Image (cartoon, rainbow, N blue to C red):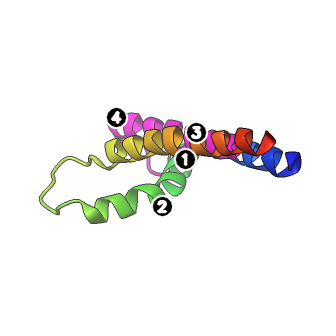
Amino acid sequence: MFVVSNFVTALAQVVDIILTFFYWLILIRALISWVNPDPYNQIVQFLIRTTEPVLVPIRRLLPPTMTIDISPVIAFVAIIFLKHFLVQSLLDLGYQLRQ
């Protein structure tokens, strides 16, 4: 059973790393949007390509009258929730399977 335990624990750590990576990408994109970046810059294009799949569904749920884009804030809340709920649950499950 230790193999399944190690797999679940490793999965939790990978999910945690991916969520942390997305957190930082969304934060950097939000900060860069304040300075009107060059849309042809490769770094800006990378940030847009990687964060749009996360932010577009959130924008669809928001009312169209919103003048300020708060989708990054909602994404931060979702990421923090997933890190505390999903990752911690997977880690706890992995430790439970070990015993």
Task: Answer with mark 4 or mark 2, whichever residue precedes in sequence.
Answer: 4
Circle on res. 35: 4
The Cα–Cα distance between marks 4 and 3, rounded to whole angstroms, is 36 Å
From the viewer's perspective, is residue 70 above or below residue 84?
below
Tell me if label 1 and label 3 are in contact, CB under 8 Å. Answer: yes
Circle on res. 86: 1
From the viewer's perspective, is residue 43 above or below residue 51?
above
The stretch in magenta equals 12-41
Amino acid type of the residue tagged 4 in the rendering:
Val
Which element type, helix, strand or loop, lies under badge 4?
A: loop
Q: Residue at x 44, y 42 (%)?
A: 81
Amino acid type of the residue tagged 3 in the rendering:
Gln
Q: Is residue 67 found left or right of 12 in the rendered image? A: left
**Magenta stretch contains residue 65:** no
Tell me if label 3 and label 2 are in contact, CB under 8 Å. Answer: no
Q: Residue at x 33, y 41 (%)?
A: 73
Task: Answer with mark 3 or mark 2, whichever residue precedes in sequence.
Answer: 2
Q: Say which residue label 3 marks.
A: 88
